[in-house]
Amino acid sequence: MANTKEIKDRINSIKQTQKITNAMYLISSTKLQKARKDLEATEPYFFGMEAMVDRLRRHLPDIENPYFETFDELPEDEKVYAYLVITADKGLAGSYNHNVLKMTEEAMSKHKNTKLFVVGELGRQYFESKHIQIDEQFHYTAQNPSLHRARMISLRMLELFTKREIHSLNIVYTFMVNSMATENVNQVLLPLKASVPDVSLPMDVYQEEFMLEPSPDAVINAVVPNCTTGYIYSALVESFCSEQNARMQAMQAANKSANEILHDLSIQYNRVRQAMITQEITEVCAGAKAAQKD
Amino acid sequence: MAETYYFRIIASNGIFFEGKVQAVLFSTIDGERELMAHHEEMIIAVDVGTLRYQTPDNEWHKVIVGVGTAQFANNRCTVLVDTCELPENIDRARAQAALERAEEQMRQRKSIVEYKMSQASLARALTRLKETSRKNV
């Protein structure tokens, strides 16, 4: 059995760790509150944007626009698939980072040519350690997402897409379903898919016709960059919120297990101490008895 | 009284306005446009600039919006923009600093991306300054 000093050291070290996890818990819970407020404010914009793009797709006449080009004629070997991955800047967030990275690797393994754009320090280090090529001039933090950062990212992506350096853009991020559940999403941002009506409408139903001013092309060219920025911004906010949530839960669990270990260790410590006392008494008694006999 | 319709401005940081209006005026890529009730169904790109809307009490309200889109369908109009601010909430000093920064960047001709980026921030800063100076002077 370990001696009291060893147990005491162990207890102290766990207490120190618990202090850290507890502080991290408090920090992430205040950050989460802020992130959640941002998220609530962005959600109408996000859903409005999705609905608008859907509507635009449904009502779009057959036109040729670079943002709709699917490069079907290009052989698969020559297509470049870009992945925009949103991870956290640091770990200690349960399976948050792991899930995103796993999904990215799975998606990437399906294509021959891929390009990686990673937001967040942890993801960058992960891919570097695995010797997977990532874009080096792409340095963005996942902390406190801002519209400015989203603008910079989307401008870069759109430039690559219009220059034909990438032929498809996917975004991998974490979506917050509710405070308990998060979901990983892999969404194709570019090219936009042209209209494919899901349901066949009867002939006599009035289908609204949209006027696109000044021309469909001009509207698309103005709308697509905005939508991409909006989507990236919302994805950043969703991910940041999920990250804080994941960290909060992980730290809560860490606190709980630290308490359990402390409980067990203190019982063990008391037992060892008691055993020592008992032994000493026995020794003293034995000594006294031996002295009496003389 | 003029007919009204349902109008919403959604910015990336929340729903800015929601309610009945008589008319909405905003700038597009090729000029200003006014939308009245029962307008034809349409989707149109909104440019950086001022957006004005007339509430049923005949009052005109003015806000400053960033780029986005407006859609009109079933006598409802939704404007989706990245930013939306009241003229009195604009920080003049910040806008002035942004303007100078953007001008500086425009002067040093760099890549096309950087040019576009500074052009966009220049437009935003200019609109903000224009509206606040109107208020103050």
Image (cartoon, rainbow, N blue to C red):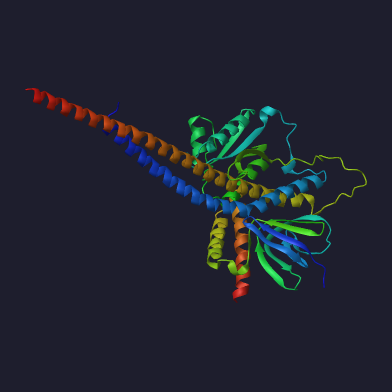
Nearer to the camera, A11 or A226:
A11
Q: Quadrant of residue A289?
A: top left
Residue B90 in view: yes
Q: Residue furthest bottom?
A: B137
Instruction: Residue A145: give x, y in percent of width and height.
Output: 55, 50
Q: Is residue A290 left or right of residue B18?
A: left
Front residue of A75/A145: it is A145
Up/down of B18 relative to A199, above or below:
below
| Image quadrant where one finds the N terminus of chain A | top left
Is residue A63 left or right of B126 when viewed as pictured?
A: right
Asked if B104 appears above or below A64 in the picture, the reply is below
User: Where residue A92 appears, x then y in whole percent?
Assistant: 47, 39
- The x and y percentages for residue B101 are 53, 59
Q: Is residue A140 visible?
A: no
Q: Residue at x 62, y 68 (%)?
A: B87
Seen at 73% across and 67% down, the residue is B53
Q: Residue furthest left?
A: A294
Mark count: 0
Q: Is residue A21 left or right of residue B76?
A: left
Q: Residue at 75% across / 33% down in the picture?
A: A72
Q: Nearer the viewer, residue A114 or A279?
A: A279
Residue closest to the far right: A204
Q: Is residue A38 above or below residue A245?
A: below
Give the image quarter of residue B71.
Answer: bottom right
Q: Quadrant of the C terminus of chain A?
A: top left
- Report the front residue among A21 and B83: A21
Residue B134, percent across and down?
63, 73
